[in-house]
Image (cartoon, rainbow, N blue to C red):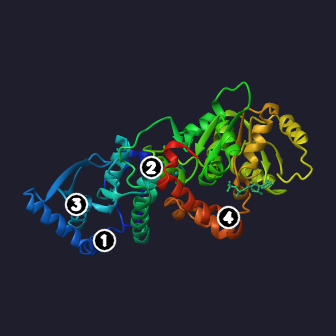
Amino acid sequence: MINTKFSLRTMTQSLKHYDSINHQYRGTFMDRPIALMLILILLPCFLINITLALCTKRSLFSMQHRTDALSRPVILHNFSCGIWVKTAVLFDIYSGRISFCGIPLNHRLPPDLQFCVINQIKCRAGLFSLYDLHLRTGLAIMSKEQLLEQQLNGNAADYLALIIKSFMSVIFYGQAIKKFKKAKYLSLFGLNVKNTSMAEAVDWITQTPADKTQIGFFVNVHSINLSISDPTFFKQLSNANALFADGSGMRLAAKKAGFLLNGNNNGTDMLPHLCESCVESNQSLYFFGAKPGIAEQAANALCKQYPGLNIAGTKHGYNEDNNAEQIIESINNSGCDILLVAMGSPVQEQWLLEHRDKLHCKTALAVGGLFDFYSGNISRSPMWLREIGMEWVWRLLQEPRNKFNRYVIGNPLFLYRTFILGLVNTGEK
Ligand code: UDP
């Protein structure tokens, strides 16, 4: 019965009917050979650790007592001294006590879900999981339950891919559980950035009571680079009511400043949540920006996907005669609650701040190339690239000329400013 699908949703609806394990997590047969290969590669490091332990008369290993998401006790080995002490966990994997990928270690599932998993699938605790991977890169597109289901239904190739992606994301972002400070607001590069999960960001957009239009911007590597070389733009960003941290670069920068970001608040992942929230709360959107026809195409596609969604109007962003007054009149006449402006940084931010007092909508956001994605004009990067925080590589491949400066020059410059110059902490120019 190995090929039946592991399902949490149908199981939780009829708990009693499932009382036998009928599914096996595929791919775990790779654990021993991969662990052995890594042990051999790391042998010199292990020998140093063993020698150090013998010289200092310490025990070779220290034990870490953990509990997995199914409340099962798990013991992990660490070297008691030396370098890369945590790599001793490879012996736990080799001996079959845990897997590379499996049931997450750092989170607990609710009791009814624990029941479903335990009775349905044969699966050990894992060093890595799809949920941990999404948490580390701040993706907020699927629930914990959906991610577990997807992971445990994967085949051997998915298993290997998850190991590789997890290794890469640990190298890029470190472990998510380290003791970083948690704060509602972070000071990054001198800007007051909101540290919200995706759901909190959407709540701010749709539920904050406001007498006048509140402005929200997404700050990413590109806008930070612009703000450092252009004091006027820095001032404009500071004048927003909310700044959301967008992208993996901001995640790295926050960690450098000692903070853990709650989510990757980028506009593209946010839009589906925003549409759902607008349908529920009966609020309307207005799309302003992008090439002629694109905002309209995006609006049509979203209305099909979210029945009941009200897009009060659209307008393209190439207005040579600079007829801002007419555009504002059309936005206000539409009676929209939320305005999305997509003209690229810094134009969209400048436009919003210049005209905020004339706008009647509740919230206005600057959203970059958002409509290009949702109109289907530009394709979104494959999930595996997003999971390791490398979506920018896809955008660079799609528009190499346009995006060369932003990514090939901009990304290393951002890292230099963050890690070498330390501008993330001080915000000094
Ligand atoms: N754009 C516009 N008017 C302009 C210049 C650009 O409407 O005068 C649009 C452009 O068509 C694109 C968006 O602004 O849809 C900017 O996209 P970009 O890729 O720069 O945004 P990102 O998401 O990278 O911030």
Q: Amino acid at mark 2?
A: Lys
Residue 285 visible here: no
Q: Residues within 10 Å of mark 4 (few under 14, many from 20)?
A: some
**Residue 264 screen position, x and y as percent:** 54, 49
Q: Residues within 10 Å of mark 3 (few under 14, many from 20)?
A: some
Between marks 2 and 4 in the image, the one whose residue lies nearer the viewer: 2
Determine which residue is flagged by label 4: 403
Q: How many marks?
A: 4
Q: CA distance from mark 4 to mark 3?
A: 47 Å
Which mark is drawn over residue 256?
Answer: 2
Q: CA distance from mark 4 to mark 1?
A: 42 Å
Residue depicted at x 72% and y 42%: 308
Determine which residue is flagged by label 1: 29
Given the current orientation, which residue lies at the most extreme top position? 211
Residue depicted at x 75% and y 43%: 350
Determine which residue is flagged by label 3: 97
Image vertical order of residue 340 relative to residue 402, above or below? above
As rendered, which of 65 and 256 lies closer to the eye?
A: 256
Disc 4: residue Cβ within 8 A of ligand 1's nearest atom: yes
